[in-house]
Amino acid sequence: MLLGAAGVETAVAFDGEAALDQATRWRPHICVLDLDMPKIDGHEIARRIREQGWPDRPLLIALTGLTTAQDVGRAMEAGFDHYILKPVEPQKLMGLIHGHLSNGSGQ
């Protein structure tokens, strides 16, 4: 809802399998992924997106309640660009998104 209210076109998936399917078909500029999803977790989705080698590399943002340095490292190894803890600080998330889009990465 936050992203939609800010004028960002969004799609929602309730499990990792659906998220990966949507991402593969839609090729979004930005993916905000929970790490703990049913069917396929966020780490695996990030790996698979990165393996596809899309010409316009999407910004991958991990959204999670996992807080250890090991958790952060695992997410970065999977291909995430940013790691945000829940509850989300709207300004932080929107800052990452606007920064990515304004520097031409999402065009």
Image: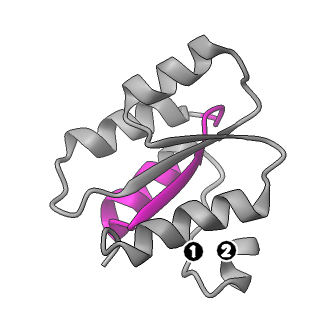
- Categorize mark 2 by other alpha carbons within 10 Å: few (<14), some (14-19), many (20+): few
Along the viewing direction, whichever of 78 and 22 lies nearer the viewer: 78
Q: Is residue 48 left or right of residue 44?
A: left
Residue 21: image x %, image y %? 40, 55
Name the mark on residue 24: none
Q: Secondary structure at mark 1?
A: loop
For marks 1 and 2 on the same chain, the one whose residue lies earlier in the sequence? 2
Residue 54: image x %, image y %? 19, 56
Quarter occupied by the C terminus: bottom left
Residue carrying label 2: 3
Residue found at x 38% / y 23%:
77
Residue carrying label 1: 10
Q: Amino acid type of disc 2?
A: Leu
Residue ranking furthest to the bottom: 7
Residue 63: image x %, image y %? 65, 43
**102 w.r.t. 15: above or below:** below
Residue 91: image x %, image y %? 74, 64
The span shown in magenta is 18-38
Colouring method of the image? one colour
Residue found at x 44% / y 28%:
76
| Disc 1/disc 2 C-alpha distance (Å) | 7 Å
Residue 91 lies in magenta, yes or no? no
Q: Is residue 34 left or right of residue 107?
A: right
Residue found at x 49% / y 44%:
17
